[in-house]
Amino acid sequence: MFLVSIAALQQNTAILREVANAAGCKVVLALKGFSCWKAFPYIARDLDGCCASGLWEAMLARDHFRKHIITYSPAYDEAEIDELLEFTHHLDFNSLSQWFRFREKIFRHPRFLSGELQCGLRVNPEHSTGETPIYDPCVPGSRLGITAEQLAGADLIGLSGLHFHTLCEQNSDDLESTLKAIDRKFGHLLRSPQFTYLNMGGGHWITKPFYDRELLINLVRKAREEYDVEVWLEPGEAVAIHTGVLRATVMDVFESAGHKLAILDVSATAHMPDVIEMPYRPYVFLVDSSPAVAGPAPAVMLTGENYHLASDPSHASFTGDHLSTFRLGGPTCLAGDVIGDYSFDRDLVVGDVLVFDDMAHYTMVKTTTFNGVKHPSIALLHIDGRIETVRVFGYADFRDRLS
């Protein structure tokens, strides 16, 4: 079961609201990271809207968030443009060819003529700051964003915004160096009266304790003053980080080539793919009836249960032969469906419950029914301790997906 804490979500969005107010900018939820729309009523007050990666996410924002909508996609088809023109507020394009293809239609639309709809371009400052290539849109030959060379001499009539998204789980010092690159490459555009908004994208770890929020506030203020533009931020992970867990049950334990193995009823590839793609190492807690609790338990855990934090041999050294290391894996046929090696205070047994921390963002949005593995249900943990199950998956969800 995916269990999302409303209290933890609101704690994050309160921080985002405070930062946005201090910086004088707008902050929106990136639906690609967290789109559990049953939670929207509890966080919409603190956020200015949503950013969507295409038509379906934009429709979700329209139907369930009901505030400002920013839409950006690497490419649109004509039918998508026709629908988006009716309700999105920012429509950002990834290439000049896409903009040139659709701009005459956009110019004629009443919402564009009235100013209710504005259009922008995603730019690529060619300034890499991240450490994971799969999440770096500034690598040579990137398909995401327009370079300064490509924009040179182009007809940009009708555009009013620039959009960049180059960060991933990063602090504001990386934003600072990125903004310097933006100024070198595109500052002349931002200083012209034509451009009225600058979208700084996502990847800002604003709600992490170590994040330098004061620097972010100063950077946004400086950009607003320097370019006389409205600034937008699109945090996805910062909204939902440390707000949810995934509860799993041990289905089988055995040994192979000197390794203790535990098969769980959840899968890395099907239910937490960032464990394989990023790669990301989640904290794991063992639910235990013992009165002693080893290590801190996340706030989203159910009251009345005790949790023992497992050690991760790949990241932490440990001593003592009382620790029992298990390789945790999923129930699919993929040989690499492995969450990792973790050490516990005792041997795992069938029926044990393990809780994976930080499973709200980039988890539910990426899950699949690969191998016909049962999909975890989705539940909200309300402030009063009540658990509301908002989605239960069954055989029909697997059967009907491809028919």
Image (cartoon, rainbow, N blue to C red):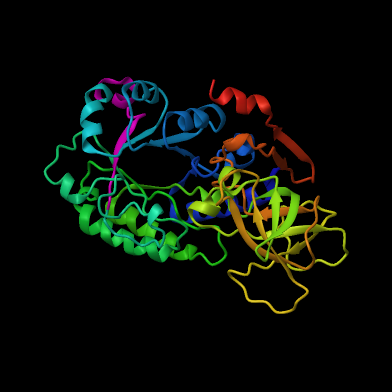
Point out the residue furthest to the front here. Answer: 257
Quadrant for the C terminus, please: top right
- Residue 79 within the segment the image draws in magenta: no
Q: Quadrant of residue 180?
A: bottom left
Residue 359 percent location from the top left of the image: 62, 50
Above or below: residue 70 compared with residue 252: above
Residue 17 visible? The answer is: no
Quadrant for the N terminus, please: top right
Q: Nearer the viewer, residue 159 or 101?
A: 101
Residue 388 visible? The answer is: yes
Q: Quadrant of residue 256?
A: bottom right
Q: Is residue 100 left or right of residue 73?
A: left
Point out the residue furthest to the bottom here. Answer: 319
- Magenta stretch bounds: 107-124
Point out the residue furthest to the left here. Answer: 153
Residue 381 percent location from the top left of the image: 73, 44
Q: Which residue sits at x=32%, y=26%?
A: 77
Residue 32 percent location from the top left of the image: 49, 41
Q: Is residue 320 left or right of residue 193?
A: right
Q: Which residue sits at x=62%, y=73%?
A: 316
Residue 198 percent location from the top left of the image: 33, 47
